[in-house]
Image (cartoon, rainbow, N blue to C red):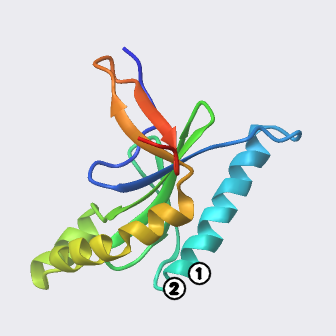
Amino acid sequence: MGRSVSYPSGAIAAFRLMDEPDDGWDWGYEFLVDDVVDTARLLFPSLQLFDGWRGGEDRILLRKAFADCGVSIYCGLAAIWLVERDDAQYWEADSRQARSGCARQWLAQVSDRFTKAFGDLRLVGRFSNGEAIFERVGSSP
């Protein structure tokens, strides 16, 4: 079965190709991480640095009270994503004072800005084997 880049379920995801720099993939990945952190903090100042993972492939770079921002890569394709938090501390706080509604509202408000800032590619669909199909942003449908 084919596969594509991972990103958390329900996330707003923007996609871009990573160019392999002369110094190798490690340097290219670190450059991507720095770019995501700097750009996201300019766009959304309430995001704070965070170092964590959602599963084994989705790295959390930034966090706020109810959202995570991160990056996932696979074979030179990067997914930059923004999603409602899904950790025990968040859900425990949500049970005392509802945050989930605020999270969904905020994510809906920032979705277009986020995808315009980070996305060079748009997910068009998937084949039955799981492989994803992308088109360049600005291409005719």
Q: Marks 1 and 2: in contact by CB < 8 Å?
A: yes
Q: Which mark is residue 45?
A: 2
- Residue 1 coordinates in the image, percent (x, y): 36, 14
Where 107 falls versus 12 (above or below)?
Answer: below
Helix, strand or loop at disc 2?
loop
Give the quadrant of residue 132. Answer: top left
Give the quadrant of residue 98. Answer: bottom left
Query: Extreme front residue here?
Result: 140
The residue singled out by tag 1 in the image is: 42
Judge by depth and name the residue closer to the eye, 77 or 121.
121
Query: Extreme right residue here?
Result: 22
Q: Residue at x 32, y 17 (%)?
A: 129
Q: Residue at x 23, y 77 (%)?
A: 105
Judge by depth and name the residue closer to the eye, 56 or 84.
84
Q: Amino acid at mark 1?
A: Leu
Where 39 falls versus 36 (above or below)?
Answer: below
Q: Amino acid at mark 2?
A: Pro
Query: Extreme top residue here?
Result: 1
- Residue 114 coordinates in the image, percent (x, y): 46, 67
- Residue 49 coordinates in the image, percent (x, y): 55, 74
- Residue 118 coordinates in the image, percent (x, y): 55, 60
Judge by depth and name the residue closer to the eye, 55 or 40.
40
